[in-house]
Image (cartoon, helix red, strand yellow):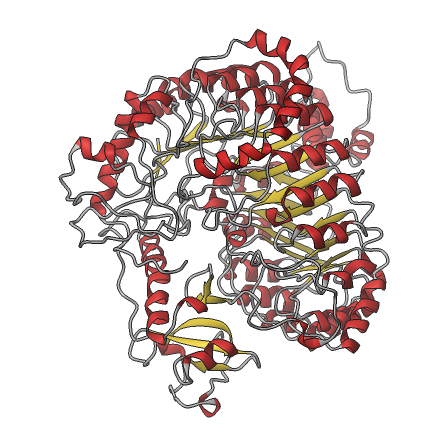
């Protein structure tokens, strides 16, 4: 069947006549316009193009093949189906980001099934589906597997709802599959049997990432799969694969650009040790390496041979001590992106500053987020050390238990190019530990010095001053996360009135009430979404806002107990689809 | 570390208390900081007991609520003496309200006055090098300060903002030497010195846990711990299926009969050879040294429950 849909009555060639006398006919024949547009990939650019004039709008919709929907409830499957006719790739995002941290109840929604039903009808040539924070059931996966003969790539990030059976359907039916990429997802205890369901003649896989799944996979089937998929370049296995098993897979090492190791065994014979060492040396083209739990110091040297061309090292689930970590780093001179756990401590970060001059992104996760062990983790000193040695740093996620304003001021002077600055001082409302002052000046320095800042997460003791700074200086800010901060409604008002490019705002446990909420009434249709939880917003305020803004969905999540008048969890977002039809009983749309 | 016992989680009356209190406090607050100083409650170190000072009937007075600014929750019904509270785990999203007490540092006054913006920019340049020096030279004293200022752990839902799967990573014991010469001989890594956490998953619960077997010295204690671990999660799961509003507060039913096949669930484990065995057959210390993984399975899904050593092993793929 010809994938080109027949153009109907609303085809571009008819639209020229609808221009009024002020609009000359388009200088471009439609075919030329469409051809040009076929090179435009970015959905933001395409959005702009579609707003120019009607024939451009139509040309754009005929030629768009990649769909990006940042909030699945902002639009409906029907609306999408009417506008776009030939979609090959879909990216859909669902739940609010705070659902990653258990703030959103189960069964909140974002089930992809209705979308799949529509896609099956209208986009039979769908090739890619990328979901983030959505629920996809086995039913959905089965529908996916059976409805799209050209389906190639499945990527699930922070998703839930599926079991092994859904994956079995994908493996069995998708003959042209090139990608299975499952990240950060919560699943039922998914068994590993799905991996054995690929047909014997199946060989198209290029990306295989199942590291987050905890089912035991049949190693022999995996080995056969890897050896017949000659194009496989990304392989990230799960814990059920041991190091010596991985070694056998690494016979195909030279092809791999990304590798995720399995678990490290307790014992290796000298022979095994040598074999594994050789196998890793075989991985000459590795750019990305991630390690799973318990990569003990004894075995880290095995990996050295694979690190020469490494640009991204992910140790975020492999706690290391500073000494072994520093030794490891010495073998990774080309690192641009590094994720570690704070067990490496400030000393480890000093080593980063010394060994990684090209570093652009650093994430330091806490080993002990609930502070049960009273370990120090990293401090402002580690961050300072990195900033001194890594001037190209522009993305940081840093969890720590103490910080000072002075340190942050220095850090952003060393690295003025921050685009993403996510600092989490783990004890809520903690002041500068040296001066006992609020951390206002730290974030003030960030927004004043880093003019390109796009994403900011603030923490520590913060008054409204921080938000004054942000509103005044952070003109490119798109995403802001605020927790346990601010002194009054004025803080949030500064944000709503000040940041013209704001798209996503998430707030928890701040003293912002109805006045703050309503101060943004003009703004909310220009942002994707706002989350406010444990603030001082009331049902009255939410209802007022909802009444004034018909194109906003104002949802309140009701939980046990709680005062009837309070709106303890508010999620509002712009939508052309009207109120959700699938809202569970605990979600009230006002 | 794992020695907490626990009251029923999430008694319904609790939810009435916390939000009102939070609202009330919010209204009281001007700049917020100095008010909170008075209301601060110092909590004991982790591992110690958090004692509830007075009996917590549902008719707790305002004053008392203000005093008992504890994290998470406390049972609303009268407690037996020596109530021990475990810091609520981040899993229990249905039992905790986001409103709670923030932690304050024990010593030191917090400067509340708003800083005027100008002095900052003028001072900044001059202060940079000074600041950096201060940061380094003060580090030693600061460490002591920090140690003193560190209050009890905060267990708030969704804070710090870490994904669930990152929370269960067992950190290595501090005594691990980083200078161990990488010996290629197999017995360089002792079983005993490795972290003794084993994963445990329960049928129907998407998120598994890790537990430290060394803490439980008997099967009975293990069974009790498993009940505690999962009881709340099961109740939460059921509640969410109901839409989250109906029914009683989620204390949950006890998960019993784990070891003898009499309950709805049965505890099994996987040993180092990957075989599945019923828990309880071998002496405890033998069990601890061979167990690799635990599972809590629905009893109905198991074949005939047989006891005894390897002869009774379950070679069944429980999943369809």
The reply, left or right, for residue A10 in relation to residue B298 is right
- The image quadrant of residue A170 is bottom right
* Residue B174 appears in the picture as rendered: yes
Q: How many marks?
A: 0
- The image quadrant of residue A298 is bottom right
* Residue A513 appears in the picture as rendered: no
Which of the two residues, A170 or A230, is positioned nearer the viewer here? Answer: A230
Image coordinates of residue A424 in percent, x first then y, are 54, 36
Q: Residue at horizontal 51%, vertical 40%? A: A97
Image coordinates of residue B117 in percent, x first then y, are 55, 10
Question: On the rendered image, what quadrant is the C terminus of chain A found in?
Answer: top left
Which of the two residues, B184 or A241, is positioned nearer the viewer here? Answer: B184
- The correct choice, above or below, for A126 with respect to A25 in the image is below
The reply, left or right, for residue A38 in relation to residue B153 is right
- The correct choice, above or below, for B192 with respect to A181 in the image is below
Question: On the rendered image, what quadrant is the N terminus of chain A found in?
Answer: bottom right
Image coordinates of residue A459 in percent, x first then y, are 51, 30
Which residue occupies the extreme bottom position in the image? B311
The reply, left or right, for residue A244 in relation to residue B26 is right
Q: Residue at horizontal 49%, vertical 21%? A: A437
Q: Residue at horizontal 82%, vertical 45%? A: A334
Image coordinates of residue A64 in percent, x first then y, are 70, 38
Q: Residue at horizontal 70%, vertical 69%? A: A243
């Amino acid at each position: 069947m010809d994938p080109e849909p027949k153009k109907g009555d609303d085809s571009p060639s008819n639209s020229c006549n609808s221009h009024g006398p002020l609009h000359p006919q388009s200088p471009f024949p439609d075919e030329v316009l469409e051809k040009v547009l076929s090179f435009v990939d970015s959905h933001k650019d395409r959005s702009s193009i579609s707003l120019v004039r009607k024939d451009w709008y139509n040309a754009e919709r005929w030629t768009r093949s990649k769909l990006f929907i940042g909030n699945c409830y902002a639009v409906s499957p029907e609306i999408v189906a009417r506008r776009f006719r030939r979609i090959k790739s879909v990216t859909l995002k669902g739940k609010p980001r705070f659902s990653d941290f258990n703030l959103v109840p189960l069964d909140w929604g974002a089930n992809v099934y209705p979308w799949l039903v529509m896609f099956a009808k209208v986009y039979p040539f769908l090739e890619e589906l990328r979901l983030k924070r959505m629920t996809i059931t086995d039913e959905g996966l089965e529908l996916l597997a059976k409805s799209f003969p050209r389906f190639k790539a499945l990527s699930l990030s922070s998703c839930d709802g599926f079991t092994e059976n859904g994956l079995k359907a994908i493996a069995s039916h998708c003959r042209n599959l090139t990608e299975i990429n499952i990240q950060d997802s919560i699943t039922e205890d998914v068994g590993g049997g799905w991996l054995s369901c690929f047909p014997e003649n199946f060989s198209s896989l290029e990306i295989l990432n199942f590291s987050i799944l905890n089912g035991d996979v049949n190693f022999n089937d995996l080995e056969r799969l890897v050896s017949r998929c000659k194009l496989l370049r990304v392989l990230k296995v799960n814990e059920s694969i041991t190091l010596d098993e991985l070694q056998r897979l690494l016979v195909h090492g030279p092809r791999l650009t990304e590798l995720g190791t399995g678990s490290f065994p307790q014992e290796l014979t000298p022979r095994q040790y040598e074999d594994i060492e050789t196998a890793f040396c075989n991985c000459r083209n590795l750019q990305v390496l991630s390690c799973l739990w318990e990569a003990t110091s004894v075995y880290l040297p095995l990996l050295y041979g694979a690190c020469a061309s490494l640009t991204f090292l992910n140790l975020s689930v492999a706690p290391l001590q500073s000494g072994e970590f520093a030794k490891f780093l010495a073998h990774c001179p080309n690192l641009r992106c590094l994720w570690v756990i704070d067990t490496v401590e400030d000393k480890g970060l000093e080593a980063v500053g010394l060994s990684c001059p090209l570093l652009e992104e650093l994430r330091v996760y806490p080993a002990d987020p609930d502070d049960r062990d009273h370990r120090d983790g990293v401090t402002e000193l580690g961050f300072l050390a990195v900033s001194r040695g890594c001037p190209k740093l522009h993305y940081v996620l840093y969890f720590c238990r103490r910080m000072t304003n002075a340190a942050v001021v220095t850090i952003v002077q060393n690295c003025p190019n921050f685009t993403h600055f996510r600092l989490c001082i783990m004890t809520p409302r903690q002041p500068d530990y040296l001066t006992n002052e609020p951390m206002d000046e730290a974030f003030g320095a960030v927004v004043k010095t880093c003019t390109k800042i796009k994403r900011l997460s603030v923490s520590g003791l913060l008054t409204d001053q921080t938000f004054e700074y942000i509103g005044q200086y952070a003109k490119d800010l798109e995403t802001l996360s605020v927790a346990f901060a601010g002194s009054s409604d004025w803080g949030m008002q500064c944000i709503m009135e000040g940041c013209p490019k704001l798209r996503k705002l998430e707030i928890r446990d701040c003293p912002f009430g109805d006045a703050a909420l309503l101060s943004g009434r003009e703004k909310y249709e220009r942002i994707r979404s706002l989350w406010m939880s444990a603030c001082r917003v009331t049902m009255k305020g939410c209802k007022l806002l909802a009444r004034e803004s018909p194109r906003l969905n104002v949802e309140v999540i009701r939980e046990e107990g709680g005062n009837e008048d309070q709106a303890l969890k508010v999620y509002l977002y712009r939508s052309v689809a009207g109120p959700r039809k699938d809202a569970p009983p605990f979600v009230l749309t006002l | 570390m794992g020695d907490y016992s626990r009251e029923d989680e999430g008694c319904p009356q609790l939810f009435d208390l916390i939000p009102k209190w939070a609202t009330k406090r919010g209204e009281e607050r001007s700049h917020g900081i100095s008010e909170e100083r008075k209301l601060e409650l110092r909590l004991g170190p982790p591992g110690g007991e958090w004692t509830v000072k007075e009996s917590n009937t549902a008719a707790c007075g305002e004053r008392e609520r203000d005093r008992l600014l504890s994290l998470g929750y406390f049972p609303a019904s009268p407690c037996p003496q020596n109530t021990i509270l475990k810091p609520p785990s981040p899993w229990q999203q249905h039992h905790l309200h986001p409103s709670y007490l923030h932690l304050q540092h024990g010593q030191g006054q917090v400067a509340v006055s708003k800083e005027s913006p100008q002095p900052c920019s003028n001072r900044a340049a001059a202060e940079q090098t000074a600041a950096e020096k201060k940061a380094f030279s003060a580090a030693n004293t600061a460490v002591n300060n920090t140690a003193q200022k560190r209050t009890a752990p905060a267990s708030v839902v969704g804070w710090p903002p870490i994904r669930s799967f990152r929370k269960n990573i067992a950190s290595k014991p501090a005594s691990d030497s980083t200078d161990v010469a990488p010996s290629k001989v197999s017995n360089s890594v002792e079983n005993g010195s490795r972290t003794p956490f084993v994963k445990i998953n329960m049928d129907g619960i998407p998120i598994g846990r890790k537990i430290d077997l060394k803490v439980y010295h008997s099967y009975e204690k293990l069974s009790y711990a498993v009940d505690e671990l999962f009881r709340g999660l099961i109740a939460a799961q059921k509640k969410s299926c109901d839409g989250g509003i109906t029914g009683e507060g989620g204390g949950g039913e006890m998960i019993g009969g784990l070891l003898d096949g009499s309950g709805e669930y049965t505890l099994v484990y996987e040993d180092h050879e990957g075989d599945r065995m019923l828990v309880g057959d071998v002496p405890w210390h033998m069990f601890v040294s061979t167990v690799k993984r635990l599972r809590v399975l629905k009893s109905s899904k198991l074949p005939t429950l047989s006891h005894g050593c390897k002869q009774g092993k379950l070679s069944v793929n429980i999943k369809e």
